[in-house]
Amino acid sequence: MVTHVLSEYIASTQFKDLPQEVVEKCQLHILDTFAAIISGTTLPAGQSSANWIKTLKEDQETIVIGTTLRASALNASLVNGMLAHADETDDSHASSLTHPGCAILPAAFSLGDARGVSGQELIKAVSVGYDIGPRISKALGGERFFDQHHSSHSVGGLFGALAASASLLGFNAQKASYMLGYGVQMASGNACWRRDPDHVEKAFDFGGMPAHNAVLAASMVSSGFTSSRESLEGVPGLFAAYPISSRIEFATEALGERHELMHTAIKKWCVGSPIQSALDSLSSLMVEHDLDHRRIDQIVVDLPAQSAPVVDKRDMPAVNLQFQLSLLLIDGAITFHSGHDYDRMSDALVIELMRKISIKPRPEQEFIDNSRQAIVTVYQSDQKQLSSHTLHVRGTPKNPMTKSEIQEKAFGLIAGVLGKVKSHALIDRVDHLQNIENIQDLRSLLTPN
């Protein structure tokens, strides 16, 4: 039975079972998510959630990362999750259509920080979360599930955070099955977040709600709550509720053999996932042909049909393809600040270039199979036509960023909040996270002076 197999995996996996390459990549994903959280404190979702936590009077057992605030593990997990997806900086898992890190790490870290667990325990829990959450979302249908207006990001993030929380607390298989049972009831999310102009509801849906619900379920099961032992399979059951898209066998496929961390992308660009490959393609053309935006008549971007609406002429800078490509052409680079600058979206030159950029949705099977590709075609005023096809965007498993690239990205995101000295120290400590006996030692490095 699927619930039993997943529960046994959650309960039995130990740090020593993880291949060293998984441990090393997990540390990089933890760093990348810390960077997303810390940079998220400067954005609307981060500011809204920080203002909310200030109104609460409660035990201050753990930190709100990137701030001087303290909160209960339950509420810190919600805020840390919203901070982690305050924009499009965090990691993504293409085949399941999820952003695993923004839900998994906030839940595991908030529980772990409150209890003073070791770095190895945190790594093990996070790895288990990545193995469960994306599998559940993929088994529900991934993009087919999303096409029915369900939020794969919320549901996959929830089950990843539930698994990480159960693993961190050392739950046996029966308690882990209770966690999954409550997860079936908590699983929620509608793709109406695509109409959110401020990335606040989206931050709650992708990161805050899943992390919070996982920590809530963990506290309930810890205190003696029980639930169904077979919540995923059968009728009724999670997958029976979504018969159009579900493939239940994907929930356990290669479990323990294929670690989903190794198939999760760390973004080079702090923008929506479908924009990544378009930026890579345009960047290549700029280097190869010394493009001058003043001599461009039109740019057409071929994107997978299911991805195109997500980034076409959106209100938010970080998920607006036309805005990001225009910035790259004008500035020659995209920084965290410029990529989130609402004022630049009203700049006359930016508007002029944005009007020249259109998206061509591609429904063909080869675009469905590889949903993170793009073809950028530039039509110049001298009738010259240039094109670049990015099949595997930088940061994806088939074109991964190096450790130094990921650390450089993290430094650029956190130095403005923590300062250069503390940022370098945090990056070094996370690089040796498996040797830390108590993750509370990270508190001073994760909070500003």
Image (cartoon, helix red, strand yellow):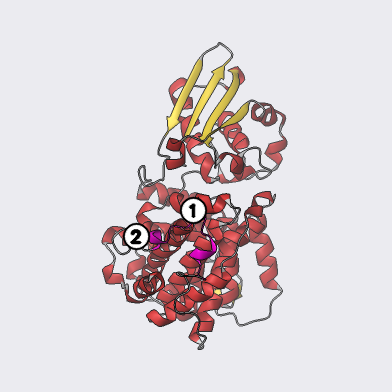
Query: Does residue 420 appear in this view?
Result: yes
| Residue at the image point whose x is 48% and y is 67% from the top | 159
Q: Residue 88: where, in percent of width, then height?
A: 55, 50
Check disc 1 and report its element: helix, strand or loop: loop
Q: Residue 11: where, in percent of width, then height?
A: 36, 76
Q: Residue 445: where, in percent of width, then height?
A: 48, 66
- Please state, as top left, top right, bottom left or bottom right, where the C terminus lies in the image: bottom right
Q: Identify whether 428 is placed above or below 118.
A: above
Looking at numbered disc 2 in the image, what kind of residue is underneath it? Glu
Outermost front residue? 235
Residue 240 magenta = yes
| Residue at the image point whose x is 40% and y is 74% from the top | 167
Q: Identify whether 235 is placed above or below 207.
A: below
Looking at numbered disc 1 in the image, what kind of residue is underneath it? Gly
Image mark count: 2
Report the front residue among 238 and 25.
238
- Please state, as top left, top right, bottom left or bottom right, where the N terminus lies in the image: bottom left
Tell me how far mark 2 sits from mark 1, CA to CA.
15 Å
Stretch in magenta: 236-251
Query: Does residue 339 appear in this view?
Result: no
Which quadrant of the view contains residue 249?
Answer: bottom left
Report the front residue among 83 and 376.
376
| Residue at the image point whose x is 27% and y is 62% from the top | 19
Report the front residue among 61 and 254.
254
Disc on res. 259:
none
Which quadrant of the view contains residue 57?
Answer: bottom right
In the visual, does 224 lie left or right of 60?
left
The residue pinned by badge 1 equals 142
Q: Pointer 1: residues within 10 angstroms few (<14), some, or many (20+)?
A: many
Disc on res. 253:
2
Residue 64 magenta = no
Outermost top residue? 382
